[in-house]
Image (cartoon, rainbow, N blue to C red):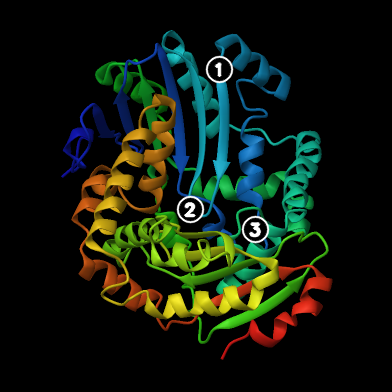
């Protein structure tokens, strides 16, 4: 039996959100928000570094840059730029591990024209050799700029240890040699594998009516041919190997004016443990409170200037990171006390009921605040569409409020307490020698 577009199972959505799947598999989400007379058009693709082997690492990011260059309707970058100026459009894109997205924000009266521009860019790109020769150094320059940051150097070294031979699957910025040797043919490989209607989400947000927006989307994107394959079935992703043991390193760098420590674990995957994805955010918020034992033991005692804990939501193994800027004069003491705190994270009394309540209130306020700007909403929804689900996006704020102590204990015991980690320290050579950092910053 053939299913009509309206016959697909409807996801749970907040008030003012409307969803439809077109016959070609393209999902269309319309968010009615009339705060300002603008519309934001975003298209997101399940693509990013997690789809890249070593030969292609960084090319999803380069693809993002080339997206705004030339296409069938606007065959030169100058033509494309002129059209965005005529529409008064703001535009940009981003590439991360599990999503690539592109957007235009323009006046609501230009919605149809904006959708046509997006359709031309996503479906009919032109990769001119001369444009790629100009853009490759730009993308590689972003990489070089990051490399001048000691925090990036520390992060990148941690990633090497955390993901091993699958580093490329977690590294959106790419590899210099791959970026600098990219060809139009390789761009087309990415497009043909992943830039498919049945692997994309089109979001229209702003001062629009959902019935009108759906009609426009179907009239413009409806003839985009559906692929006869699921890209993640045809091109299966490799499985990340668990860390067999903890790994430590001390990286000496003259640009590290102050030392930094990073401790990272392989955390939950939404695809297998969505409950821990939610619990991870709540616990990270708890230890970020000024009243937390971690902050009091390190920051209040003068052992560190900052301590941050984060979990990055991923469909496939999100990392857990703790970043510490230690007092250079108390480096060993800071590390020793952190390891002491880490050993108590899962203790029943490590945080109070009041702190759990405060963390939930912070997450609720943060969620409300993040949704105040209409043009920000498409990117928030598409991130979850790519790495979790629309239902997860809808339920997240409420699910934070449902997290229990037992949920947090399960998360900590499963992914963090006593589990292998990667520990990295970046430090100036003279301070490394003075403190003999390698003598204490090591696995026991």
Asked which quadrant contains residue 438, the reply is bottom right
Is 235 left, or right, of 176 in this rendering?
left
The residue lying at 36 percent from left, 28 percent from top is 372
Label 3 secondary element: loop
x and y, in percent, of residue 245 in the image: 52, 87
Is 80 left, or right, of 275 in this rendering?
right
**For the residues marked 1 and 3, what is the alpha-carbon distance in whole angstroms?**
30 Å
Which of the labelled discs sits on residue 98, or is there none?
2
The one of 23 and 374 positioned closer to us in this rendering: 374
In the image, residue 128 above or below residue 308: above
Provide the residue designation for mark 3. Answer: 57
In the image, residue 374 above or below residue 164: above
**For the residues marked 2 and 1, what is the alpha-carbon distance in whole angstroms?**
26 Å
The residue lying at 44 percent from left, 37 percent from top is 379
Residue at the limit of the structure toward the bottom, as seen here? 444
- Label 3: few (<14), some (14–19) or many (≥20) C-alpha neighbours in 10 Å: many
* Residue 76 visible somewhere in the drawing: no
Residue at the limit of the structure toward the front, as seen here? 301
In the image, residue 389 above or below residue 109: below
x and y, in percent, of residue 62 in the image: 67, 44
**For the residues marked 2 and 3, what is the alpha-carbon distance in whole angstroms?**
13 Å
């Amino acid at each position: 039996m053939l299913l009509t577009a309206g016959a697909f199972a409807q996801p749970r959505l907040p008030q003012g959100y409307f969803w439809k799947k077109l016959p070609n598999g393209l999902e269309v989400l319309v968010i009615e928000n009339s705060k300002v007379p603008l519309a934001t058009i975003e298209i997101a693709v399940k693509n990013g570094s997690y789809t890249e082997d070593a030969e292609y690492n960084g090319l999803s990011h380069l693809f993002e840059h080339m997206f705004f260059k030339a296409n069938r309707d606007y065959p030169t970058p100058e033509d494309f730029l002129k059209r965005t100026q005529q529409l008064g459009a703001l535009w940009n894109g981003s590439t991360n591990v599990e999503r690539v997205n592109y957007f235009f924000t323009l006046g609501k009266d230009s919605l149809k024209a904006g959708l046509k521009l997006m359709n031309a860019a996503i479906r009919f790109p032109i990769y001119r050799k001369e444009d790629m020769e100009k853009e490759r150094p730009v993308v590689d320059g972003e990489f070089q700029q990051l490399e001048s940051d000691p925090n990036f150097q520390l992060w990148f070294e941690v990633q090497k240890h955390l993901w091993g031979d699958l580093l490329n699957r977690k590294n959106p910025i790419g590899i210099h040699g791959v970026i600098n040797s990219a060809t139009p043919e390789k761009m087309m490989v990415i497009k043909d594998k992943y830039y498919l209607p049945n692997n994309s989400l089109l979001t229209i947000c702003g001062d629009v009516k959902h019935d009108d927006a759906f009609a426009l989307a179907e009239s413009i994107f409806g003839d985009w041919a559906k692929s006869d394959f699921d890209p993640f079935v045809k091109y299966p992703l490799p499985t990340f190997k668990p860390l067999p043991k903890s790994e430590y390193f001390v990286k000496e760098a003259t640009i590290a004016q102050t030392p930094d420590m990073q401790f990272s674990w392989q955390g939950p995957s939404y695809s297998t443990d969505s409950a821990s994805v939610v619990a991870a955010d709540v616990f990270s918020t708890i230890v970020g409170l000024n009243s937390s034992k971690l902050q009091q033991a390190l920051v209040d005692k003068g052992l560190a200037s900052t301590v941050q804990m984060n979990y990055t939501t991923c469909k496939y193994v999100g990392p857990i990171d703790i970043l510490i800027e230690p007092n250079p004069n108390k480096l060993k003491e800071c590390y020793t006390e952190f390891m002491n705190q880490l050993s108590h994270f899962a203790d029943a009394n490590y945080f109070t009921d009041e702190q759990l309540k405060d963390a939930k209130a912070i997450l609720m306020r943060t969620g409300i605040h993040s949704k105040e700007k209409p043009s920000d909403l498409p990117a928030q929804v598409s991130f979850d569409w790519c790495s979790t689900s629309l239902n997860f996006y809808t339920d997240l704020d409420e699910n934070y409020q449902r997290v229990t102590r037992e949920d947090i204990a399960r998360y900590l015991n499963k992914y963090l307490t006593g589990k292998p980690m990667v520990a990295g320290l970046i430090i100036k050579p003279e301070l490394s020698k003075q403190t003999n950092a390698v003598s204490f910053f090591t696995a026991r």
